Image (cartoon, helix red, strand yellow):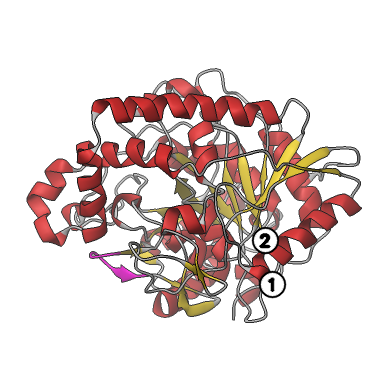
Amino acid sequence: MSDLTQKPATELAALIKARTVSPVEVMEAVLGAAEATQVACNAFITLDGERAMDTARTQESALMQGTADGVLFGVPVSVKDLCNTKDLRTTFGSLYYKDNIPAADCVAVARLRDAGANIFAKTTTPEFGHKPLTEAPLYGRTLNPWDRTRTTGGSSGGGAAAVATGAGPLGVGTDGGGSTRIPAAACGLVGVKQSLGVVPHDQTPDVFGLLAYVGPIARTVADAALMLDVMAGPHASDPHSLGRDLQGLAEAGALPMDIKGKRIGWRTRMGNERVDPETEAAFKISLGVLESLGAELVKRDDPFENTLPVWGPLTFSIWATRFADVEQKLGDQMSDTLRRWMGEGRSFGATEVQSAMEARTRLFRQVQSWFQDLDFLATPTLAAPALPADQNPFEPVMIDGGDAGGLRDGWYPYTHPFNLTGHPAVTLPNGFTDAGLPTGGLQLVGPWLSDADLLAASAAYESAQNWTNRRPN
């Protein structure tokens, strides 16, 4: 039974379809792992085991009757508690919504259910997903399964802890500045931020200024690609999704690309000063792997400014507007970090926000210009492995014994840019430190709407490595 918790979703789906294992066996194993993960890491806000077992029994009957349908039939999936789930508590990590029961699934979750996925839990998130450390007044702090003195990152930290420990092979995350890729990298997983609009985002009130993406957390590229394929496609709620009917995503993740002759640009800095030595060493080894597969590596050392001054005014001003009523009602029961950044958002004037919007456009054009002579871009995902669990978001991040700057501009300067520009980005496991922590991930980025090619290139890198089978104890 424990072996079932370590199998990828693609294999589980095939075993269930072949009746080698039953959906009930799979869910029992995953719920057992989830209970252990909850004790060790505090990864879940809501575990819906009874209903998940009822669904599994119904699926088993359908399987025996020959009516089973869907590429994820019987596969357990957890969902970050920022995403609406019908009749299943969705709190947004906030005491304000601690009893909130949505009447409908968000689009991405509805599509997963239609594909046969069994939603069994809601995973932890900082309040409204506002920071890269997964903790909130509602539930406490989520810990990294590789080292419980370390953070999972955030804001999809619960989903990353769950997938890493075998509490389901797939997790739905969201990514507004790196929130899928950060915890995936900190926990040794695959995390995808697809091109803008590939997966509809029907919950955001600010769709035309969208920086946030709903995407997969998985242990393998093939699993992430299959999940993305299910969630992708146009929907009337999201204008960015209209016309975004990408084909072959699942197949791309399952069939590694021959990257011989592909030009891959690389950067170790994106407006940051310091990178952890083990993280940088792992990144250089990753570049060597890509080169050994036949890729042509191109160093990109043209000037690049840290994008926090662009991301910050846009994001903090959105929070100040969107959560003002919640702050008024909760007062100091709201996360102090969120209240502080909302205050910063209120301090920006209209011209500062407009200037940030214009800077976003310039950033897009700069990044897109790179792909005139590159097929992909490679960077680290994080500047250092997982930080201490009690990291103060307002104190400097210490890397290699020195002050690396703030939490956002110092630890993950590599992720923000592509939320702003809309380019697809994937983080991949790329090794472990001497202390046994994931090194911080390899990020591959592609041109707009090159998601299938990016997944296939990611699969090529993954096939040359052996990190996917290494799991926390």
User: How many neighbours does mark 1 have within 10 angstroms: few (below 14), some (14-19), or many (20 or more)?
Assistant: few
Residue type for callout 1: Arg
Q: Please name whichever residue, 473 or 76, is drawn nearer the observer in this view of the structure.
A: 473
Residue 192 as seen in the image, left or right of residue 332: right
Query: Callout 1: helix, strand or loop?
Result: loop
**Up/down of 246 relative to 467, above or below:** above
Residue 448 visible in the shown view:
no
Point out which mark residue 429 bears: 2
User: Residue 158: x and y, percent?
Assistant: 43, 63
User: Residue 433: x and y, percent?
Assistant: 66, 75
Q: Please name whichever residue, 210 or 280, is drawn nearer the observer in this view of the structure.
A: 280
Q: Residue at x 31, y 52 (%)?
A: 88
Query: Callout 2: helix, strand or loop?
Result: loop
User: How many neighbours does mark 2 have within 10 angstroms: few (below 14), some (14-19), or many (20 or more)?
Assistant: many
* Number of residue marks: 2
Residue 427 as seen in the image, left or right of residue 412: right
- Is 411 covered by the magenta stretch? no
Q: Are marks 2 and 1 in contact (CB under 8 Å)?
A: yes
- Is 138 covered by the magenta stretch? yes
For the residues labelled 2 and 1, the Cα–Cα distance comes to: 10 Å
Which range of residues does the magenta coloring cover? 136-141
**Up/down of 356 relative to 134, above or below:** above
User: Residue 142: x and y, percent?
Assistant: 39, 70
Q: Residue at x 73, y 66 (%)?
A: 281
Residue 156 visible in the shown view:
yes
Point out which mark residue 341 bears: none
Q: Quadrant of residue 331?
A: bottom left
Q: Residue at x 76, y 56 (%)?
A: 462
User: Residue 181: x and y, percent?
Assistant: 54, 52
Considering only order in the chain, which callout, 1 or 2, is on the residue closer to the N terminus? 2
Which one is closest to the eye, mark 2 or mark 1?
2
Q: Which residue is mark 1?
A: 470
